[in-house]
Structure formats: structure tokens, C-alpha cells
Image: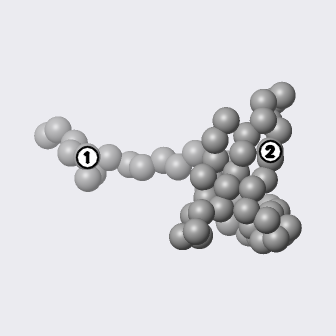
Amino acid sequence: MAETLSTLPIQLPKTAAKAPSTALPKISSDRLFSGGNILLIEHNGIDYVLRKTRNGKLILTK
């Protein structure tokens, strides 16, 4: 009898299974923005702009 998708075993990546969510670094956006609405991030020699919108969302652009 052929196996269906619901009977196949699911394997998580080993790193996902071991890393609890508390192991990730966390910083508040208020601390990053320091009271402003625009933040410049350099990554691999390229500048990115992170902006806060009036609706409280974040937009990252090159």
C-alpha cells in the first residue's frame, strides 16, 4: 500500500529542534531607532534603510 502525505514521517532540521526561541537575540525597535523613524543598516558593504511607518510597520529598502 502506498504511503500518503499524512503518514510520512516529518523530520525537523536538527538546529530547529534544539534551539529554543529564547536563544535568539532580541532588541526593541524603540531602542534601535532611538526616538527617530529611520535607521541606516550596513550589511556586507551595502547600506539598507529601515523605516517605521505611521501604522507601526517596518519597511527595509536598499
Visible in this render: residue 18? no
Residue 7 point in image, percent of width and height? 27, 51
In the rendering, which numbered label is found on residue 31? none
**Residue at figure coordinates x 85%, y 67% from the top left:** 34
Foreground of the two, 14 or 27: 27
Q: In the picture, which quadrant includes the C terminus?
A: top right
User: Of the residues under marks 1 and 2, which one precedes in the sequence?
Assistant: 1
**Circle 1 SS class:** helix
Residue 2: quadrant of the picture: top left
26 above or below 8? below
- Disc 1 residue crowd, few under 14, some 14–19, many 20+, Cα 10 Å: few
Q: Nearer the viewer, mark 1 or mark 2?
A: 2
Residue 30 in picture, x, y percent from top left: 78, 71
Q: How is the image coloured?
A: one colour
Query: Is 31 on the left-hand or right-hand side of 58?
Result: right
Left or right: residue 23 compared with residue 12: right
Residue 41 bears which disc, if any?
2
Q: Which residue is mark 1?
A: 5
